[in-house]
Amino acid sequence: MIRGWYTSASGMRAQQFRLDAVANNLANVDADGYKKDIAAFKAFPELLLRRMDDDGVYKHPFGSGDVAPIIGKLGTGVELNELFTGFTQGAMKETQSDFDVALDGKGFFTVETPWGERYTRNGSFHLGKEGYLETKEGYPVLGENGRLQVKANNFQVDKDGGVWINAEYADNDLLVSRERNTWEDTVLLDKLKIVNFDIDRYLIKQGSSLYRESDTSGPAVVMEEGSRPRVVQGFVEASNVDPVLEMVQMIEVNRAYEANQKVVQSEDSMLGTLINQVSRIV
């Protein structure tokens, strides 16, 4: 009976982790670039139940106990195996703002923070006080050669992540190239620093849609031509959370939690009966 308590308690604890992940996903369903949390579980090893004589002697005393007839299995509980991020593509939302940029495909924008470089899928940027392209939290967005200094209504981003500015406002010391674009009279300022990782699911969330690398994810690698995602200006990537699916999972979690809770109550009732009634008869 005591084993039943522990088995049910492990199930309740596992469902609590799952509920936390679902609740966090629903809370961020409208957050641009948010990627949902996924909880994965693993079962403890199962025990085989074998038939024995009433006196506890195996049917085959001179051989291994493993030859005793198997009558079933007994589960011993479950635990959280890992909580990881699912980086499936979110829907594109049109904003018609020059400062909004979305990635269509694998990859991350790079931003400069007080803790070092961090990475995000949220391309909802704005123009900072010093003229740099920044996140809404005020972290500068990085190009392959540093910060990007632009002017409102005077820059464009092509599908490869190249940032083009009006030649009239170009500073020769900042330009990567004097190459001309087909868009009126513009020159290439820099390219967005778009990176990827060996195993992106193990990136660590830091809040504000920012991620940092871990030992498992591997270091950030700047993506080269041909492997970069398509960059779309005037759009942002919505979260990849399906609210209907998350609500269904929340119902499943509540029912599973209640089922484990009832098992604990039943075990407690049976143990109480054993102690208070059966023991008196014996």
Image (tube, grey):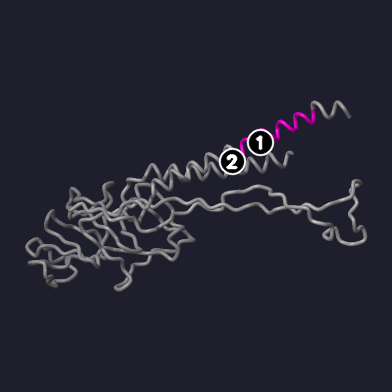
282 magenta-colored: no
CB within 8 Å, label 1 to label 2: yes
- Please rate how many residues cluster around mark 1, counting C-alpha atoms within 10 Å: few if below 14, some from 14 to 19, many from 20: many
- Disc number at residue 264? 1
Residue 171 position, x and y percent, is: 12, 63
Q: Is residue 51 left or right of residue 168?
A: right
Of 121 and 64, nearer the camera is 64
Residue 26 drawn at (x, y percent): 40, 43
| Magenta-drawn segment | 259-275
Q: Is residue 188 left or right of residue 185?
A: right
Using residue 273 as the reference point, say whether residue 132 is left or right of it: left
Q: CA distance from mark 1 to mark 2?
A: 10 Å
Residue drawn at (23%, 55%) of the image: 235
219 in relation to 37, above or below:
below
The image quadrant where one finds the N terminus is: top right
What amino acid is labelled 1 in the image?
Val
Residue 239 position within the rendered picture, expressed as x and y whole percent measured from the top left: 34, 51
Identify the disc placed on residue 12.
2
State which quarter of the image contains the C terminus.
top right
